[in-house]
Amino acid sequence: MLGADALVKTLADCGVTLCLGNPGTSEMHLVAALDREPRVRPVLCLFEGVATGAADGYARIAGKPAMTLLHLGPGFLNGGAYLHDARRAFSPVINVVGDHATTHAHLDAPLASDVEGLVKPLAGWLDAARTSAESGPKAAAAYAGSLGPPGCNAFLLLPADAAWSEGGETSKPQAAPARRAPSDVDAVANAVRAAKKPAVLLNGDALYAEHLEHAARLQAAGVVVFLDTFATRQSRGAGRFAPMRLPYFAEQALAALEGVDLLVTAGTKHPVAFFAYPGKPGELTPENAKRMSLGGPEISSAAAVAALADALDAPRQGFALAAPFAPEAPKGALSPETIATSLARHMPEGAIVADDSVTAGMSLYPMTAGAAQHDWLFHTGGAIGQGMPMAVGAALAAQEMKSDRRVLALCGDGAAAYTLQALWTAAREKLDITFVVFANKAYRILLVELFRTGAGNPGPASNAMLTLSNPTMEWTHLAQGFGVPAMRCETAEDFDRRFARAIAQPGPMLIEAIV
């Protein structure tokens, strides 16, 4: 057996069913191995950032890793931004990075680089299969390594001669690693009883639909329940418990936490500001508040919250749940607020929202709390451009699970321009995604941050760096060029009507919202 076949078949035996890639010459034997392993679906992405962002979205919905196929150091670097986001989401991803044959490395060919050194900062697990005999066992180890806990980027480097040489053997799947048990539950419960205003900050599986009841019990017991500003995934909508999302801006987060004298974390760390600002604090825990932790992302936050609720003998009924919100059709000028109204009106049951809307999202998230039940995927690492690829991965997971879940990709125009190649993959794979691009013709969030950092009013040079006009991107033309039907909306009435139509038809559709 060739080393490439041993690697691909071993991953298939472990449960990998999806390969997202943009391969090159050093990966051709891996590509050929996919012809001989029908359990793994190959999906071509026109840019490595689409492959890695999609692997993140896939993992968040499927709950297991996909395989990415990246071409040497430059291929990894093209995908690195969204592996940064995946790392912050604790998503399990197996990245197979091809490298020059071991016999060729000393020649310093044009694409030669220190691949191991490049990937190391983003790696939760890293190894190289330098012979065909190593490819199977190390593929099994990579799968287990990607699961952590917490989930992480696993990198398996594969020189071309290890792929094309005979001598490979498949390896049995390794046992999935166990999550660590939550810590200090009784001590935390005692501290909660003694506090005047206790609060808990959550991320991880405590925010999934099947576990939200445990967090609701804490709220009923007098604990204020927050979720991370950019959580991995939150199940929300009418009839579900809705924790308070910690605001993005530091001063708003501090206001939300005002009076808290005990802050407990589960599945996350204590909150910090996204950036440093002159004269403003970086840590967001209120002054003099006690900090305790049930465990970070290496635990099941759902198990931790359930154990704390039991220790507090928290109520099992009488929870405050999100009320249904079915607003009247919006009218007038198109804005994030009127678009949020349309989302609340027409959100399909079971939808998945991939949020990369940046400034527009400040209205979209709160106004959809009472929409039909859905899952919201957040922008965890701050590398914009994640929304379209993440939507592709989530839709591939939904397809694989044979569900009819619609995916909504909510993207700022500046962010979408990073990874618009995802549209082509959505068209090719016939994915049920509605892309909404908020065309405000600026990096609006950076204009906000220009003032917040004290840098002053924007002048001609600043405006040239922060605006997206002259020329203006034509998103309907761009989408159609990649094979995705598209519509342009300038009024609230038009968007409401067209959005309802877009989510009702199969396949991808893009709406350019002029805001």
Image (tube, helix red, strand yellow):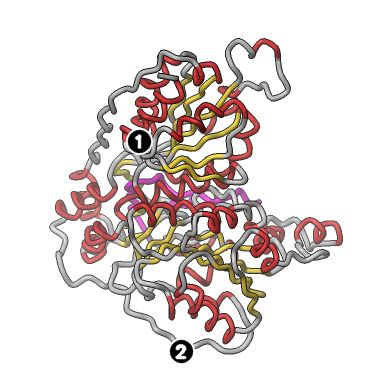
**Residue 109 screen position, x and y as percent:** 71, 18
Mark 1 secondary-structure assignment: loop
In the displayed structure, 316 sits above or below 106; it is below
Q: Amino acid at mark 2?
A: Glu
N-terminal of the two: label 1 or label 2? 1
**Residue 49 screen position, x and y as percent:** 59, 44
Mark 2 secondary-structure assignment: loop
Q: Quadrant of residue 67?
A: top left
Residues under labels 1 and 2: Cα distance? 45 Å
Query: In the rendered image, which residue does mark 1 sit on?
Result: 147
User: Magenta stretch: residue 269 in it?
Assistant: yes
**Residue 239 screen position, x and y as percent:** 28, 73
Residue extending farthest front:
36
Q: Amino acid at mark 1?
A: Leu
Part of the protein shown in magenta? 260-285
Point 54% across, 29% down: residue = 97
Quadrant assignment for the C terminus: bottom right
Q: Main secondary structure of the magenta part?
A: loop
Q: In the image, 63: left or right of 115?
A: left
Q: In the image, 502: left or right of 218?
A: right
**Residue 23 screen position, x and y as percent:** 58, 35
Query: In the rendered image, which residue does mark 2 sit on?
Result: 328
